[in-house]
Amino acid sequence: MAKTQTNTAQKPSRTEKPVETKGFLTMESKISLGLLLLLLFIIYIIRSKFLLIPFERDEGIYGYIGNLILEGKTPYKDFYEQKFPGLFYFYGFMVGLFGDTVKGMHTGFIYLNLITIVLIYFTSEKLFSPVAGIISAATFAFVSLTPNLSGFTIQSEHGVAFFISLGLFFYALYSTKNKWYYNLLMGVAFGFAFMTKTSGVFLVLWGGLTLILGFLFNKNRNFKALVIDVLIYSGGVFLVIGFFFTIILAKGSFNEMIYWAYETPKNYVGKIPFEEGVKYFGYTRDAIVENHKFFWVHAMLGIGVCLLKSVNFKMKLAALTLLFFSFCTIVPGYYFYGHYWIQTIPGLAIVSGLTYYGIITFLRDNMKLKQQNLKYVYLAVFSILIIKHVSALKSYYFHPNYERILRSVYGSNPFPESMEIANYINANSKPEDQIVLIGSEPQIYFYTKKKSPSRHAYFAAIVSDVPQHKEWQREFVSDVEKVKPRYVIFFNHSISLFVQPNTDNYVFQWANKYITEGYHIVGVADMVDGMQTNYVWKEALAGFQPKGQNIIYIYERNTQPVTTPAKP
């Protein structure tokens, strides 16, 4: 991509690189930077309204793993996830910097989001113009808040979006300044995106493709220079990969990493048929775009802009391929979960800037309209539509109802209940007391600052249809029996247990016997119709009959024999 500027002596061609303006800021830059500061302030206010919203299970496990990293635990041995180690150390950094509380983590991700907005602004500003920068920044800012793509969460994709945006920023610097170290840093940034989540590899590929496009559209092609550029870029990528792999080698868990981050995801990817994936895509797309159509439509106009002669061919290809590779990040497995889409927003935002740039340039060149006035009219209309959007969603943005939002996005998943149960445990336990979950709600471990007695903090793994699950069940049982946890939380909830067909029933037979012989019930969370939950504690349990199909039981270890055993 390239940004053109008008020179009083000679008008540059559409394929020329921009001429940098030294000295004072233009009026357009001052206005755009002022709007950027206003945008950052508004987004900070909005996101601060979500500081205490409960985590969903992925957020919970990531925060929990972040704590384990800071304690020096060994990845893939003391804990595991189907991701490369960049994810673990990214969350370790966030927990270490902002604290292991819900408020602390949300605060950290507010700042991460604000920095990403700034990166998007300066990327688009350097590629196109300051007004294009603010349009791209606003697009990212509001689309990344979409509830159905988990915009209010601390999902790992927010970290991936940050690294993608950082890579795009260095791409813009390399495109405009042609300094080798910006090429290297682009590789480093995209390498971190890949190490944080495997789907980041598509942006690694895009970064390499831009170098080839630069070579193809350079009048003075130099194949040797292309090879050097590719080697420098690849060096940046492999520097990051090598850094994390060296850590894992030093920890002695390289083979385990290959199993969890490479072998296991193969089973995950092949489960959804293509036809079902298309249905999931349509459902998720409609839910995400519904209340943010203006931003998506405006960005998608960038595809039409690529038909205009006012946009040079290299810029068109770079934009279209950025959209394509951004889309590829949500495709693997055909799950199309809402939070996957966060990875697409940096590319969407940059193309939104291209929409503005292409339209303004076309009108200037073909209709002889005065660009100075036209760009501010465009900006004014864009701002009015943003105000209209914010007004329509003011309840979500400024007065969010946490439980209603979680139910709307995640249905009957027991995420509000997990925090309520954790509050009870925190109020009725000592720091040394341990807990165990029969269910996949690891956010409770994070809320209570208590460690899982087993590396299988995600219960779903030991009831999954992989050959090792029988061995894992017995390992889990042995780990629990060694620590004799004070509390057992049993999630009689199909989504939380996530038992796969034809898996061993051993762990449930053991749990029934173990709880019956050593524990008594102290609480019930009765999820009536999956939406309304009744919490009943201790003495109030006498004569209580749950009404819901999804019920969470809280058991406490006996200090003396009880006459009436409790069954999960």
Image (cartoon, rainbow, N blue to C red):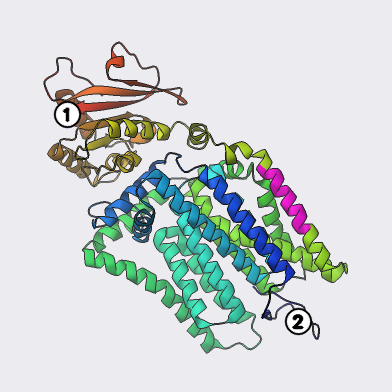
Which residue is drawn at the image coordinates 51% and 77% (left, top)? 182
Q: Residues within 10 Å of mark 1 (few under 14, many from 20)?
A: some
Which residue is drawn at the image coordinates 60% and 50% (left, top)? 42
**Going from the N terminus, do you reach mark 2 or mark 1 first?**
2
Residue 9 quadrant? bottom right
**Amino acid, disc 2:** Pro
Note whether 555 is above or below 270 in the view shown.
Answer: above
Note whether 393 is above or below 357 in the view shown.
Answer: above
- Write down the residue under mark 1: 514
Query: As rendered, which of 44 and 197 lies closer to the eye?
Result: 44
- Tell me, yes or no, if residue 9 can be seen here: yes
* Mark 2–mark 1 CB contact (< 8 Å): no
Query: As rendered, which of 518 and 283 lies closer to the eye?
Result: 518
Query: As rendered, which of 513 and 2 lies closer to the eye?
Result: 2
Disc 2 element = loop
Per the rendered image, the range of residues in magenta is 378-390
Q: Position of residue 238 (x, y in %)?
A: 39, 73
Q: Position of residue 377 (x, y in %)?
A: 80, 58
**Amino acid, disc 1:** Tyr
| Residue extending farthest top | 543
- Write down the residue under mark 2: 12
Q: Is residue 382 magenta?
A: yes
